Image (spheres, rainbow, N blue to C red):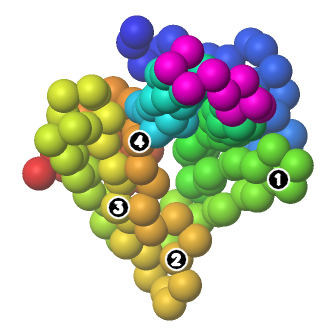
């Protein structure tokens, strides 16, 4: 997937993002977090399935499947939350939009961003995600850390070029 694929949404996500843009703003970058954010919920569902299968077969406990359905519901909730969460960069600001029942929009004007760093853990390097750490002028930072960013090097260069211009947009 290239950056143009990441930047163009023509689904429900597009409407979700567009409602937070001012009339003179256009989306420059809009991406969902990396699907690796769902690893823990998926692991819980698979582990619960194995545990429930063992408990049901070996011990004859059938009510335990109701507990597994609760864990499965947790996974569904996390998938829905992931599907409507966006990292958005316009010509004027950086935003993270998230929340299923209550929508949260964290915003940082581009003029306040003084530095952006890309950090990648070993798992992030193996799975293809990274974390953006943004420094801003001012005390309270609504968007200091933005984790699980897909295509981290490419996205870092794109975000850096929007925030700081075309010059000096290479990762550390």
In this picture, is 169 found above or below 154?
A: below
Name the residue: 42% across, 62% down: 145
Q: Please, what secondary structure does the residue beneath circle 2 have? A: loop
In this picture, is 5 found above or below 166?
A: above
Mark 2 vs mark 4, CA separation in Å? 19 Å
Tally of numbered tags: 4
Nearer the camera: disc 2 or disc 4 = 4
Q: Callout 1 environment at 10 Å: few (<14), some (14 to 19), or many (20+)?
A: few
Name the residue: 81% across, 21% down: 12
Q: Please, what secondary structure does the residue beneath circle 4 have? A: strand
Name the residue: 31% across, 66% down: 115
Residue 140: x, y in percent? 55, 84
Which image quadrant is residue 59 in?
top right
Which image quadrant is residue 135 in?
bottom left
For marks 3 and 1, the one nearer the N-term is: 1
Mark 1 vs mark 2, CA separation in Å? 19 Å
Residue 86: x, y in percent? 63, 39
The front one of 91 and 88 is: 88
Query: Which residue is identified by label 2?
Result: 141
Mark 4 vs mark 1, CA separation in Å? 19 Å
Q: Please, what secondary structure does the residue beneath circle 1 have? A: loop
Query: Which residue is identified by label 1?
Result: 103
Which image quadrant is residue 155 in?
top left
Magenta stretch bounds: 57-66
Residue 33: x, y in percent? 51, 36
Query: Which residue is identified by label 3?
Result: 133
- Specify whether 5 is left or right of 85: left
The front one of 123 and 144 is: 123
């Amino acid at each position: 997937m290239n950056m143009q694929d990441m930047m163009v949404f023509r689904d429900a996500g597009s409407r979700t993002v567009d409602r937070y843009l001012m009339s003179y703003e256009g989306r420059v970058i809009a991406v969902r977090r990396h699907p690796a954010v769902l690893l823990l919920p998926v692991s819980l569902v698979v582990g619960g399935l194995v545990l429930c299968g063992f408990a049901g077969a070996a011990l004859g406990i059938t009510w335990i499947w109701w507990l597994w359905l609760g864990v499965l519901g947790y996974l569904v909730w996390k998938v829905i939350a992931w599907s409507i969460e966006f990292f958005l960069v316009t010509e004027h600001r950086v935003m993270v939009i998230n929340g299923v029942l209550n929508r949260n929009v964290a915003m940082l004007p581009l003029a306040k961003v003084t530095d952006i760093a890309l950090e990648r853990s070993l798992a992030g390097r193996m799975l293809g995600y990274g974390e953006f750490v943004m420094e801003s002028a001012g005390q309270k930072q609504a968007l200091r850390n933005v984790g699980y960013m897909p295509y981290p090097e490419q996205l870092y260069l794109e975000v850096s070029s929007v925030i700081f211009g075309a010059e000096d947009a290479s990762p550390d």
